Image (spheres, rainbow, N blue to C red):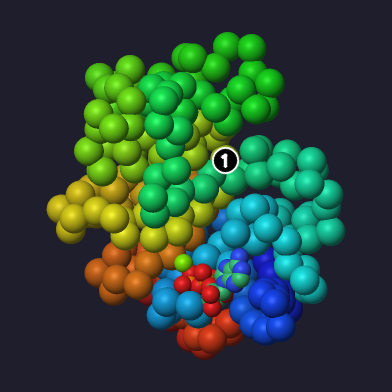
Amino acid sequence: MIRTEGLTKRYTIGESTVQVLKGIDFSVQAGDMVALTGSSGSGKSTLMNILGCLDRPDSGRYLIENEDVSTLGNDQLAGIRNRKIGFVFQTFNLLPRMSALENVALPLMYAGHDNPRPMAESALARVGLQERMHHQPNQLSGGQRQRVAIARAIVTNPAIILADEPTGNLDSKTSVEIMDLFLQLNAEGRTIIIVTHEPDIAAYCKRQIRMMDGQIVEAAGRV
Ligand code: ADP
Ligand code: MG
């Protein structure tokens, strides 16, 4: 489903350059559920942004379903992102003045859908929030906001879901509910990668990959 070969990325601020990714090779099979762990600053978000087609590597290759996307232009990259990937963020990233329904409908609007509402409603129903679809984010709890964000991520029916510390701002009971939801989405056949630094969250996944200082240092699997 996903394969990277020698991905590198560095950031330059003023005089100083930081090599954030130092050659990342890994692959994820369709239907897998992978935890990406590692301490703060190890490069997890940088890698996820590249996997999510939100950013590009400096060198190396990134293949989604055998298509090399590392050299695509912005528009093509946005197209891949819209069709194949749902991204979930730690801070939910919902638009504050829009209802849950409008937030979830956005990816469909970007894709030029004629009638986004029924699909947005069914995505919200899928995460158990049909009753709250006209609420704005500030009228929802943290767990409900993350459910809206997950509905937005799945509304285009992507094969891949990427989540960067999706439970980082949630209490442990709510975190369990959100992880149960990811398990269900995985059971439906979606490929999922979740960044976390919490071992009990990582334990939900079939496989764990650990990053340290811009490199993958360890991969452990249960299956
Ligand atoms: P993690 O998600 O594992 O905490 P990140 O990928 O966010 O790590 O960051 C890895 C390193 O890259 C850090 O040292 C961070 O300061 C640096 N970094 C991340 N994004 C940027 C950016 N846009 N500009 C400059 N430095 C960045
Ligand atoms: Mg991060």
Please, is residue 104 above or below residue 39 in the view? above
Q: Say which residue appears at 43% left-offset and 37% top-offset.
A: 94
Could you tell me residue 145's position as x and y percent?
Answer: 32, 38
Which residue is at the front of the view, 20 or 122?
20
Q: Is residue 127 visible?
A: no
Q: Say which residue appears at 66% left-offset and 44% top-offset.
A: 81
In the visual, does 181 lie left or right of 172? Answer: right
SS class of the residue under badge 1?
loop
Mark 1 is on which residue type? Pro
Please, is residue 172 above or below residue 11 in the view? above
Could you tell me residue 20's position as x and y percent?
Answer: 62, 79
Q: Say which residue appears at 78% left-offset and 60% top-offset.
A: 70
Q: Tell me the quarter of the picture where residue 84 sits.
A: top right
The N terminus is located in which quarter? bottom right
Could you tell me residue 112's position as x and y percent?
Answer: 68, 21
The C terminus is located in which quarter? bottom left
Please, is residue 17 above or below residue 169 in the view? below
Q: Tell me the quarter of the picture where residue 50 sits.
A: bottom right
Q: Which residue is mark 1?
A: 158
